[in-house]
Image (cartoon, grey):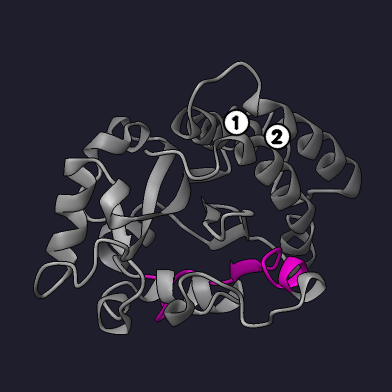
């Protein structure tokens, strides 16, 4: 296992290689995303105790409302005060999930976070962590998931940034303090992601019971490249 408390460059190199291979032999983006979430959940932990570092790992991809399955569309509609203004409305959609509770290992059992409309700032105010994640990753909400800069080099750099909350307890960006953060001992939250050629977006979020340093968080930037390589053959595929 790798440790989020002592993740090294050599660990990152090995983990990155493993992630890159997870797209082989599967037929859908959902299968790859589930492999990625499960791999990260299993591989970060304590070899001696067998305890995982992460309570929950989730993999999200953006899709337009028209591409979502009926259950995901229903979830997106519940977040809106009225129906979607456009069938092209972008939604951050759960594709893969792994965690210590049974319901956290099945995307179909997620209701609130299965699909989140992200082209409406009023809706995003209901999801402060998602709003902060998009901001830290350099994604402009009102530009249909395009990064803030038009230059290719800057686009790559920005969308390989990390989302990082060093102290989850008491953070205004992390909801469900009493229901999730405190009872499950969430110490830090780490996310990383990137943009596909189609301009769709992916992000992985780790909810860790181990303290994560800024130095460790920075080591996850290269992992985004490997995750994108695993997922890009399914860019634009439906959930």
Q: Residue furthest right?
A: 10
Query: Which x, y percent locates residue 230?
Result: 66, 35
* Residue 104 part of the magenta segment: no
Q: Is residue 37 above or below residue 130?
A: above
Image side of residue 29 versus residue 182, left or right: right
Residue 47 in which image quadrant: top right
> Which region of the structure is painted magenta?
155-174
Q: Which residue is mark 1?
A: 39
Element type at mark 1: helix
Query: Which x, y percent locates residue 27?
Result: 51, 21
**2 and 1 marks in contact (CB < 8 Å):** yes
Q: Which residue is mark 2?
A: 19
Q: Is residue 200 above or below residue 83?
A: above
Residue shown at 59% from the left, 27% from the top:
50
Q: Nearer the viewer, residue 24 or 214?
A: 24
Whether residue 163 is visible here, answered yes or no, is: yes
């Amino acid at each position: 296992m790798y440790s989020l408390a002592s993740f090294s460059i050599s660990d990152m190199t090995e983990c990155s290689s493993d992630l890159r291979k997870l797209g082989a032999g599967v037929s859908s983006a959902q299968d790859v995303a589930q492999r990625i979430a499960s791999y990260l959940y299993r591989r970060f932990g304590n070899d001696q105790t067998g305890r995982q570092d992460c309570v929950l790992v989730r993999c999200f991809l953006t899709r337009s409302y028209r591409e979502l399955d009926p259950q995901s569309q229903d979830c997106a509609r519940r977040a809106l005060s009225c129906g979607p203004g456009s069938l092209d409305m972008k939604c951050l959609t759960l594709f893969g999930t792994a965690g210590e509770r049974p319901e956290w290992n099945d995307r179909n059992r997620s209701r609130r976070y299965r699909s989140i409309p992200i082209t409406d700032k009023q809706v995003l105010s209901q999801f402060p962590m998602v709003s902060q994640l998009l901001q830290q990753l350099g994604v402009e909400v009102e530009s249909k998931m395009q990064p803030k800069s038009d230059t290719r080099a800057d686009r790559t750099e920005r969308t390989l940034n990390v989302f990082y909350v060093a102290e989850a307890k008491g953070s205004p960006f992390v909801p469900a303090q009493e229901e999730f953060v405190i009872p499950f001992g969430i110490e830090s939250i780490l996310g990383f992601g990137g943009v596909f050629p189609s301009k769709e977006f992916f992000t992985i979020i780790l909810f860790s019971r181990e303290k994560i340093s800024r130095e460790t968080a920075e080591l996850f930037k290269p992992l985004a490249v490997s995750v994108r390589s695993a997922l890009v053959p399914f860019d634009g595929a439906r959930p």
